[in-house]
Image (tube, rainbow, N blue to C red):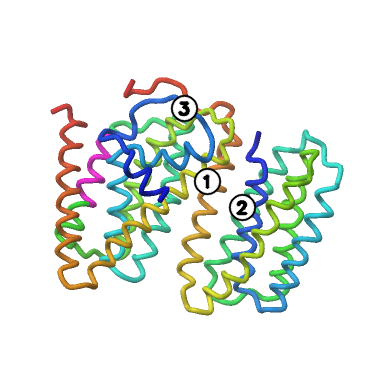
Amino acid sequence: MTIAFEVGSVTPAYAHTGTGLPGGFESGFSHPFTGWDHLLAMVSVGIWGAFLGRPLIYTLPVVFPIMMVGGAILGMFLFPMPQIELGIAVSVLVLGLCNGLAIKLPAWSACAIVATFAVCHGYAHGVELPSAADPVGYSVGFVLATGLLHVFGIGIGLLNARPMGILVTRSLGAAIALAGGWYLCLACGL
Amino acid sequence: MRGGALPPAILCAAIGLGLASAAGGAALLGLALVIVTACAMANAPIPATWSDVVFLGCWTSILASAAIVHRRKALKAKPALLLSLNAGIWTGAVIALVPSKSNLLEALPLAFCVWPAAWVRRQGQEVVLKVLANWLIAVAVLAAALQFLPVTPGYLPDHMD
């Protein structure tokens, strides 16, 4: 219910909309739900993992949080990374295409793609990490929400086992890719 | 504020997941060791000036305990007990930094996740434990990094503002 509520309250804009978040578990948990670009990318990772099957069904959701934290640390220390919004937009586009076109890649390359995008998303979160009253609570909420979005994506991806399920997931992937294209246009200033 | 009962609770959860791969007797003994050591350490006179070291020890122990979940082989008795001792020490040490010891009651029950985790493992679904362990590792890495950051950049205007 919490997830449903949070998903319902997302704003149709970048998660990276500014600053001023209060610190703590709630703000950390809600942060990944506050922008469609992050949300779509994380759900896409889950759907793609489920589509690729074992071992990637669990390897991708394992790789993503760790690399995202790596990116967040770079962001927190303000390590210069230009065009991060472009990277996020490309991540939504590529992950959407991977699902929409049912692209099967070797495990190492799927992990490399997801890891690279995870760093971009983590960086965007890291640079706006609040000077929190409770940074540990914020971290827990942030990682937990990300993980739950992956699990949600895996749940959608498991529809592939049902008749017509593959059509649903591929259509969803195509829609996500379209959204990614839109974000890319925005990031390029078009 | 540095997370209240959360850091020791996460450590207890991590050791619970880690001990799930140990043999039944070792897991039980390990659990008892965590509880006894944590209770003893929580009453130790640890100076507040040691807090950075204590928290770093806690985050590192979470990494070590959660990483055990990724081992393919079962955890032997001696390493299981050593890990439990370590987890108990840092759990108690973090709690010793604050006057109230009620955090013990919030943190220690999470170590009992060893039983559901062992059940999940027996069902051949250790993947679930690996994912959970990685979430804990991610939290520990993030929290440990925050420790080295005097001011987080969150309230500063960024390039989108």
- Tell me which amino acid carries mark 3: Gly
Q: Residues within 10 Å of mark 1 (few under 14, many from 20)?
A: many
Q: Provide the residue designation for mark 2.
A: B10
Residue extent of the magenta highlight: A84-95
Q: Secondary structure at mark 2?
A: helix
Q: Residue at x 76, y 54 (%)?
A: B89
Q: Which residue position is annotated with label 1?
A: A140
State the count of labels: 3
Residue A76: image location, x then y, percent: 47, 33
Residue drawn 34% across and 65% down? A56
Quote the CA–CA distance across marks 2 and 3: 24 Å
Query: Are dots 2 and 1 in contact, CB under 8 Å?
Result: yes
Amino acid type of the residue that numbered disc 1 sits on in the rendered structure: Val
Query: Is residue B146 shown left or right of residue A33?
Result: right
The residue at 20%/51% (across/down) is A96
Residue visible at 72% across and 78% down in the picture? B25
| Coordinates of residue B21 in the picture (x, y in percent) | 60, 73
Q: Would you place residue B141 above or below residue B75 in this image?
A: above
The image shows residue A130 at horizontal and vertical percentages of 49, 29
| Residue type beneath disc 2 | Ile
The Cα–Cα distance between marks 3 and 1, rounded to whole angstroms, is 17 Å
